[in-house]
Amino acid sequence: QVQLQESGPGLVKPSETLSLTCGVSAYSVSTDYHWGWIRQPPGKGLEWIGSVYHTGSTYYNPSLKSRVTISVDTSKNQFSLKVSSVTAADTAIYYCTREAGGTTDHRIDYWGQGTLVTVSS
Amino acid sequence: SSELTQDPAVSVALGQTVRITCQGDSLRSYHASWYQQKPGQAPVLVIYGTNNRPSGISDRFSVSSSGNTASLTITGAQAEDEADYYCNCRGSSGDHMMFGGGTKLTVL
C-alpha cells in the first residue's frame, strides 16, 4: 500500500518561503505517476497547487505559478513544494498526493494525512 | 470558464437518492473525478472516469455526464455518506487540474 507523509515547518513568517517535503513508501517516485500538492484553507475548499511527473516535468495552478516550485528527489524517494513570498492567505492544510491516469481516467488515488502550515509573524 | 461550480449544500432523506452536480466548460472535454471528505480527514477518491470505483467504495456511487455538467449520484444514501464532496477535472488547456467549490451533503 502506497503511503505519503508530509513534513516541514508548521509556522512560516510572512514574505518568507514555505517548504514541505513528501516522503513516499512502497513505491518508487522514479517509476511513474504525477506527484502533487493540494491545499485547503481552514473551513474552505480544496485547491490544486501543482504536480511533478516522474521525469521531472512540472504542472502548476496558473494562479500560483509565479510563486510555486515542485521538484522530485528520486535518490530519497520524495518530492517537495516551495511557495515563495507567503501571506496569511497561504495558511492551509497541505496534502501531498499521487495522481494517476490520463485524460479520460485521471484521479488522485493516494493522499497524505495533511499538514497544517500557518503564516504568521 | 476556467472554474468548476458546485451547489454549496444538498440534503437527502435516509435511503433516498441524491445527485450532486459539477458544472464547467472543461467538462465538455475531460472526465471528472469525485472525492469525499469527512471532518478532520483527508479526502478519499470515490469514483472517476466512466464509473470507475476504487476497491472498497460502495456501488451506491455512480457518475454521469452531459455537456458541461458532471453528476455524482448516491443511490440509497446512508448516514455514513454525510460529508463534503468535491469534483476535480483538468482545466481547458489540459495542463492543470482544478476543484469545484465542494458540496456539503446532509443525510436527514
Image (cartoon, rainbow, N blue to C red):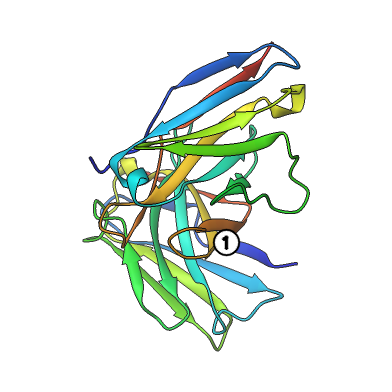
Against B11, residue B6 (above or below) is: below
> Which amino acid type is shown beneath numbered disc 1?
Glu
Residue B69 picture quarter: top left
Q: Which quarter of the rendered picture does the N terminus of chain A lie within? A: bottom right
Residue A59 location (% of width, % of height): 33, 66
Q: How many marks?
A: 1
**Measuring 67% from the left and 25% from the top, which residue is drawn there?**
B82
Q: Residue furthest front?
A: B66
**Which structural element holds mark 1?**
strand
**Measuring 52% from the left and 58% from the top, which residue is drawn there?**
A105
Residue A111 in view here: no
From the viewer's side, name the closer residue of B97 and B25.
B25
**Measuring 65% from the left and 28% from the top, which residue is drawn there?**
B74
Query: Is A57 situated left or right of B32 in this image?
Result: left
Residue B72 location (% of width, % of height): 56, 33
Against A62, residue B85 (above or below) is: above
Residue A84 in view here: yes
Q: Which quarter of the rendered picture does the C terminus of chain A lie within? A: top left
- Local packing at callout 1 (Cα closer than 10 Å; few below 14, some 14-19, many 20+) is many
From the viewer's side, name the closer residue of B52 and A17.
B52
Query: Is B64 situated left or right of B18 in this image?
Result: left
Query: Residue under mark 1: which chain is it in?
Result: A
Residue A83 location (% of width, % of height): 33, 60
From the viewer's side, name the closer residue of A109 and A72.
A109
| Residue, disc 1 | A6
